[in-house]
Amino acid sequence: MAVAVAAEWQMLYNRYYRKAEVYVMHWKQIELSRNKVACGPLGGPIAMIRDDTKIVQLYSESAVRKLRVYSCSGQLISDSVWKNPGGRLIAMSWSDQQTLVCIVQDGTLYFYDISSRITTSLTLGFDCFTYSVVQCVFWGNGVVCINEAFQLFCVPDFNSPIVVKLPDTSLDDFPLCMAVIDPKYTLSGNVEVLLALTHHVLLLDEDGVQKMGEDIGPIQKMVVSPNGKLIASYTHDGRLLVLSTDFSNIIFEYNCQTALPPEQLAWCGMDSVLLYWDDMLLMVGPYGDPVRYLYDEPIFLIPECDGVRILSNTSMEFLQRVPDSTVSIFQIGSTSPAALLYDALDHFDRRSAKADENLRLIRSSLLEAVESCIDAAGYEFDILQQRTLLRAASYGQAFCSQFQRDRVQEMCRTLRVLNAVRNPDVGIPLSIQQYKLLTPAVLVARLINARRHLLALRISEYLGMNQEVVIMHWACTKISESSATSDGNLLDILLDKLKLCKGISYAAVAAHADKSGRRKLAAMLVEHEPRSSKQVYIPFL
């Protein structure tokens, strides 16, 4: 079994990497190369719209451009006709709050929710209306744009959108490439913009302009590392350079032996850099030979905190460094305590006396072995492998009185939640590290916004979280989307679910019904509000 698992790994110097298929895409006749694509972080959705800069054959597709939102498994979540004024769509990206931000030529930003509905808009101002936006670079919750007059504008935070004009750079041509350093990683707390020019790099922030990197370049592509401390850059002579963000120190260099710049450049965690050309994905680390993956279809790289998701026309894959606990168990020839414990379970299942022999060998390290098996189970996407590793941990735990007894149960709870949202019908392929970064509360909020109230309710109940938020959102959504249902029937449907949550505010649901123009329904709901003080202040009474 260990040989079969490790056989799929690739060695990059002294570290293993694995690339696993997470989903076979459900969509049909989708060509990524014909579309502009934006993929949300932390297992977020995929937004897609036909690229109007390309001449494409429509086949059976309508000539009307549509903005479509898919889950990571290719299930269509929503779509809407693209009819926004302002010229050509320059770029789009998902924010940390899972809002889709679309920027058009005249500097207008359109904000969409996951249902493909515009929630608000923002303009960058008269300068961008006069001189069209040419290029944009997004980070988690903001964007920097450059217009035809070589002026740079920044929206530092989409949650409180204020447009900031950055200092004049006196440019007479567009930069070769741009990158941004997230404000949370800068000393000033403001976004820093890197502009690669022919002979140097400019660093801009709200306070001024600084010249750096005069001996490097010209740089044709660059991307900032997940921790904001390093820059991966591709030079005109085919070198991949990893540098400090002040360009004073080259960490490592690799000659790719082609002056053709990669179509995409991305970090894979903090240990390697990915470069994608037309048919090849190259993974480069600080030491050793690179790893090559060949593709016969276009791909789209989606950086995550612990790896990279790879989207193609037919599949979604996840490329990551193999966790140390997994290596200790499945590396070919491993004699670590965790590997021997995993092997002991196999012997136990086959009723072999070798199981007892293995346990005696690792008795002094049994605590470490059990912990490694639990940890490795958390990193697995394969449910059978999760189950086997947790069985090995439970088997070892039976002989280890010092072990914290609820660790296995805690991991089981986490994996049940992850497996539920990873299901192709839901299509949120979170890893355990991404789940911890996202938090259960935000995951439930995402499910609510995606209209998956039942799953959100079950997860909230399973994890002991407040269910009122889920039921309240469901009730308000039901009212908004049930215009054809009579007040009496809708009341029965609402009461059937609202009674599941003690203390829920019927008055708040009634207020939403009143706002939606259903005053009779609102009045009927108020009658079920147990707190008389809440009934008094309902505005329509």
Image (spheres, grey):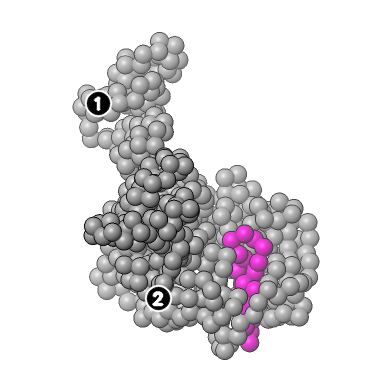
Query: Where in the figure is residue 466, as x and y percent of width and height?
Result: 41, 31
Query: Where in the figure is residue 15, as x and y percent of width and height?
Result: 52, 71
Residue 83 figure quarter: bottom left
Residue at left 75%, top 61%? 167
| Magenta range | 222-242
Q: Are marks 1 and 2 in contact (CB under 8 Å)?
A: no
Residue 470 figure quarter: top left
Label located before the other in sequence (1 or 2) = 2
Instruction: Look at the image and tell me in which quarter the N terminus lies.
Output: bottom left
- Looking at the picture, tell me which residue is in the foreground, 491 or 331: 331
| Vertical order, 92 against 448 (above or below) | below
Mark 2: which secondary structure?
Answer: loop
Mark 1: which secondary structure?
Answer: helix
- The answer to whether 23 appears left or right of 119 in the picture is left
Q: Which residue corresponds to mark 2?
A: 298
- The answer to whether 124 appears left or right of 468 in the picture is right
How crowded is the residue under tag 1: few (<14 C-alpha within 10 Å), some, or many (20+)?
few
- The answer to whether 427 appears left or right of 229 in the picture is left
Query: Where in the figure is residue 328, as x and y percent of width and height?
Result: 46, 64
Amino acid type at mark 2? Pro
Q: Which mark is residue 496?
A: 1
